[in-house]
Image (cartoon, rainbow, N blue to C red):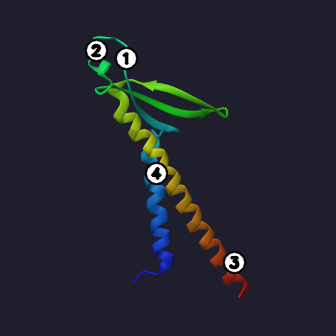
Amino acid sequence: MKSPRDSDLELRGKLIRSLGSLREMLPGSFVERKRACGRPNCHCADGENLHSQFQISVLIEGQPKVFNVPAKWAERVREKTEMRRRFDAAAATICSLNLKRFLKNKEDRQA
């Protein structure tokens, strides 16, 4: 039977190995907006069948910036911003496991 310590190390190793797949991640938030284009004869003029506009919102030097994303790139950009969320979650878990191990080692040495 595995000890909790072995399980923690296994999880940490798995998370660290998975980070290589995140090399394409993008910061920020992916946004899909619906809007009318303004042409009077377009299907969106009724206000119901609006066009999708895709954007990525990021902080650059502390300032929010929004960039349009071509529709053909939308799903890939959405996935790459989601990778960042997974990276943040993995990093938090790794740090938590490392702190737990550090505190346990410290306690063991003081005993």
Q: How far is disc 2 from disc 4 in space, using C-alphas? A: 40 Å
Please tell me whether mark 1 sits on a helix, a strand or a loop. Answer: loop
Is residue 22 or residue 45 the one in the foreground? Answer: 45
- In the rendered structure, which amino acid carries the disc numbered 4? Arg
Residue 104 pos. (x, y %): 63, 78
Q: Which mark is drawn over residue 97?
A: none
The image shows residue 106, relative to residue 39, as above or below, that is below
Viewer-nearest of discs 3 and 1: 1
Residue at the farthest bottom position: 111
- In the rendered structure, which amino acid carries the disc numbered 3? Lys
- In the rendered structure, which amino acid carries the disc numbered 1? Cys
Q: How far is disc 2 from disc 3 in space, using C-alphas? A: 69 Å
Please tell me whether mark 3 sits on a helix, a strand or a loop. Answer: helix
Q: How far is disc 3 from disc 1 in space, using C-alphas? A: 63 Å
- Residue wearing tag 1: 37
- Residue wearing tag 4: 86
Is residue 23 or residue 65 the one in the foreground? Answer: 65
Earlier residue among tags 2 and 1? 1
